[in-house]
Image (spheres, rainbow, N blue to C red):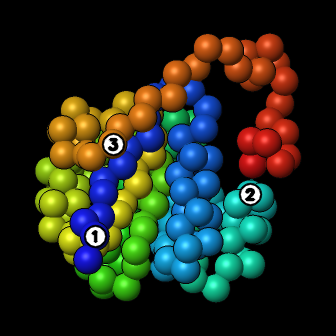
């Protein structure tokens, strides 16, 4: 049995979630069982969610209420995040998956919705064969320390800065 990896996609650039989903679709192509849990994005018509419905070995959960930096109710966001984290722990401990993506999970620790040490404990005690990808800005140094691979996406230029709105099929 191969040892699973812990991978982190972080930074201020575009592509953290996209890269994780690409890896998930690659794993599916090899017959692996995959679970994706999105913590910040609210249920919506994201292209990746629509695509996910076409795969047998993929479970996809959207556990957020939307982007919290413009939230009107951080306590509600915290409760939703904690519920999502409980789901993540259940899925990780089930030993049913080859890959789990915890999309935007760094926001949970950055906003103190969950304790960083609790997340680290879950990761350290994961089933040995399970690989986990964590995404989001400002990954905690403690997470980086335990990860096998860390990629920092760096923004050099972004169309949003020029007032260009998100494009269906590109950003969502």
Residue 149 horizontal side relative to residue 29, left or right: left
Give the residue number, with chain letter if any, for mark 2: 46
Q: Vertically, is 83 above or below 81?
A: below
Image quadrant in which you'd find residue 149:
top left
Image-based side of 5 in relation to 115, left or right: right
Residue shown at 64% from the left, 85% from the top: 56
Between disc 2 and disc 1, the foreground one is: 1
Q: Are marks 1 and 3 in contact (CB under 8 Å)?
A: no
Q: Earlier in the sequence, mark 2 or mark 3?
A: 2
Q: Nearer the viewer, mark 2 or mark 3?
A: 3
Q: Earlier in the sequence, mark 2 or mark 1?
A: 1
How far apart marks 2 and 1 lie (CA) works out to 33 Å
Which x, y percent locates residue 36? 51, 67
Q: Quadrant of residue 143?
A: top left
Q: Dot 2, how many residues are within 10 Å of its Cα: few (below 14), some (14-19), or many (20+)? A: some
Say few, some or many: other residues with alpha carbon within 10 Å of mark 1 (under 14 / 14 to 19 / 20 or more): few
Q: Which residue is mark 3?
A: 149
Q: Which mark is residue 2?
A: 1
């Amino acid at each position: 049995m191969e040892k699973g990896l812990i991978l982190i996609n972080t930074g201020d650039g575009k592509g953290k979630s996209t890269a994780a989903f690409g890896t998930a679709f690659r794993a599916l192509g090899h017959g692996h069982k995959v679970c994706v849990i999105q913590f910040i994005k609210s249920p919506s018509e994201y292209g990746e969610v629509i695509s996910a419905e076409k795969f047998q070995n993929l479970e996809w959960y959207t556990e957020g209420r939307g982007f919290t930096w413009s939230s009107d109710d951080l306590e509600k966001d915290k409760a939703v995040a904690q519920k999502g984290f409980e789901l993540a722990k259940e899925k990780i401990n089930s030993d049913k998956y080859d890959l789990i993506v915890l999309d935007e999970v760094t926001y949970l620790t950055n906003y103190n919705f969950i304790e960083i040490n609790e997340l680290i404990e879950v990761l350290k005690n994961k089933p040995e064969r399970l690989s986990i990808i964590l995404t989001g800005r400002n990954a905690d140094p403690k997470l980086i320390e335990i990860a096998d691979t860390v990629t920092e996406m760096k923004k050099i230029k972004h169309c949003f800065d020029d007032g260009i709105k998100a494009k269906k099929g590109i950003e969502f």
